[in-house]
Image (cartoon, rainbow, N blue to C red):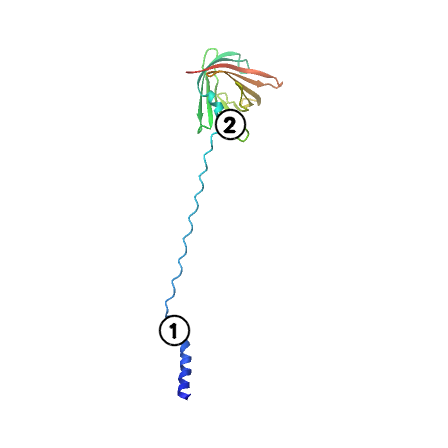
């Protein structure tokens, strides 16, 4: 190999890396990858509507407009006196409750008539019927019942708002498809039960 050939080969080997580096530098840079868009938040699941307990059908008997006659027994708020009243029962609050209004008529014998609003429902967890009431004297009650036993349904609980807390009981008895009787009772400090009122009611046709 001649000196000229050897010199040319050495020069070519020396230049090749430089040329390769220059070629790589001349290549355009690859575009940067686009950032991915954030994932859309998941929509919260719509809660399923609560099914109406089948047990509520037991309260359907109270629906409608009723006319009642009866009496309130003597108590610390006044003497015994006769009463007449209109009662209206209807499904309410998404048909999950039965609302009952009891409105006495003002008469000479009953100058301060009694008015009460009642909600009846069913506690599926506790397997019992429940009732809450408020009246025009500032009283309120909380009661429960196991349901109809034959033609009788009894609610028991407590009444508050007008003094000491008392145990109370309301008994409803069917006398036909459009007739019932009601009696209210209160347990005194002597643990004896005494009637507070009683009514006979007929449903309007």
Position in image of residue 107 (x %, y %): 45, 12
Position in image of residue 118 (x %, y %): 48, 23
Q: Where is residue 186, by image quadrant?
A: top right
Front one among 153 and 76:
153
Alpha carbon distance from label 1 to label 2? 86 Å
Instruction: Please tell me which residue is depicted at 49% across the width and 27% down the height of the picture.
Output: 54
Q: Residue furthest bottom?
A: 2
Please state, as top left, top right, bottom left or bottom right, where the N terminus lies in the image. Answer: bottom left
Contact, CB < 8 Å: mark 1 with mark 2? Answer: no
Q: Which residue is mark 1?
A: 22
Q: Residues within 10 Å of mark 1 (few under 14, many from 20)?
A: few
Name the element at disc 2: strand
Marking on residue 122: 2
Marking on residue 49: none
Whether residue 118 is visible to the viewer of this picture, yes or no, is no
Please state, as top left, top right, bottom left or bottom right, where the C terminus lies in the image. Answer: top left
Whether residue 24 is visible to the viewer of this picture, yes or no, is yes
Q: Residue furthest right?
A: 190
Q: Residues within 10 Å of mark 2 (few under 14, many from 20)?
A: many
Name the element at disc 1: helix
Instruction: Please tell me which residue is depicted at 56% across the width and 20% down the height of the picture.
Output: 168
Position in image of residue 185 (x %, y %): 56, 17
Q: Is residue 193 left or right of residue 53?
A: right
Q: How many marks?
A: 2
Position in image of residue 125 (x %, y %): 54, 31
Q: Earlier in the sequence, mark 1 or mark 2?
A: 1
Front one among 47 and 168:
47
Front one among 36 and 196:
36
């Amino acid at each position: 190999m001649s000196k000229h050939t050897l010199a040319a080969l050495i020069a070519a080997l020396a230049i090749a890396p430089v040329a390769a580096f220059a070629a790589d530098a001349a290549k355009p840079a690859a575009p940067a990858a686009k950032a991915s868009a954030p994932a859309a938040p998941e929509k919260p699941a719509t809660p399923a509507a609560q099914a109406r307990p089948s047990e509520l059908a037991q309260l359907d008997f109270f629906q409608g407009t009723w006319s009642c006659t009866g009496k309130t027994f003597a108590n610390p708020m006044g003497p015994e006196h006769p009463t007449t009243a209109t009662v209206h029962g209807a499904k309410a609050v998404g048909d999950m409750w039965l609302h009952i209004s009891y409105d006495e008529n003002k008469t000479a014998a009953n100058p301060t008539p009694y008015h009460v609003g009642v909600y009846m429902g069913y506690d599926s967890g506790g397997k019992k019927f429940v009732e809450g009431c408020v009246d025009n004297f500032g009283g309120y009650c909380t009661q429960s019942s196991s349901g109809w036993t034959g033609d009788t349904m009894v609610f028991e609980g407590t009444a508050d708002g007008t003094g000491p807390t008392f145990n109370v009981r309301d008994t409803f008895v069917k006398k036909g498809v459009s007739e019932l009787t009601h009696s209210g009772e209160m347990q005194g400090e002597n643990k004896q039960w005494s009637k507070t009122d009683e009514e006979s009611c007929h449903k309007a046709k």
